[in-house]
Amino acid sequence: PGTNILSTLPMKPSPYRTREETQYAAWSGTSMATPHVTATAALVIARNPSLTHDQVAKKLKATATKLPAMKRRHRTIEFGAGLLNLKDAVS
């Protein structure tokens, strides 16, 4: 659920961040992917307010870009339904 997603970091070093980790970093996981998926779902609902949450989830999955590593499968354990595609989801 999100791999190597670029994020901003605090500009000043702290006991938790080294000097090299003070502008941008790429992290993986649900905490990095969730804001992107949530924002896309909100935009889909804004365009189509009558959709149910199940319909929004189906739309996000159906419009996801399939990745070459998925080998033409619709869903995989590693990549889920594919790469979130904002443009196709809101169209």
Image (cartoon, helix red, strand yellow):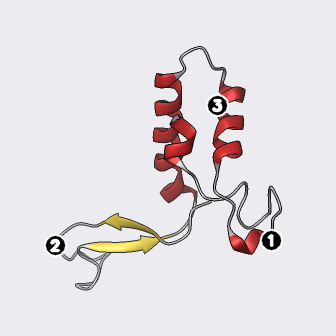
Q: Please report contact status of discs 1 and 3: CB closer than 8 Å, yes or no.
A: no
Relative vertical location of residue 16 with respect to residue 38 in this rendering, above or below:
below
Identity, as a three-letter code, of the amino acid under mark 3: Val
Say which label, 1 or 2, has the lower sequence index.
2
Q: What is the spatial separation of the Cα atoms under label 1 and label 2, in whole angstroms?
A: 43 Å
Q: Residue at the spot x=66%, y=26% of the render?
A: 53
Q: Nearer the viewer, mark 1 or mark 3?
A: 1
To which residue does mark 3 refer? 56
Q: Which mark is residue 71?
A: 1
- Horizontal side of 3 relative to 77 (left or right) equals left
Of mark 1 and mark 3, the one earlier in the sequence is 3
Q: Residue at x 65, y 45 (%)?
A: 63
- In the image, residue 42 sits, relative to residue 86, either above or below, namely above
Q: Which residue is mark 2?
A: 12
Percent x, y of residue 86: 50, 46
Question: Which kind of residue does numbered mark 2 sit on?
Answer: Lys
Q: Is residue 46 left or right of residue 23?
A: right
Q: Is residue 51 left or right of residue 48?
A: right
Quick one: which residue is furthest to the right in this view?
73
Crowd class of label 3 (few under 14; some 14 to 19; many from 20; radius 10 Å): some
As drawn, 57 above or below 78: above
Front-most of 46 and 77?
46
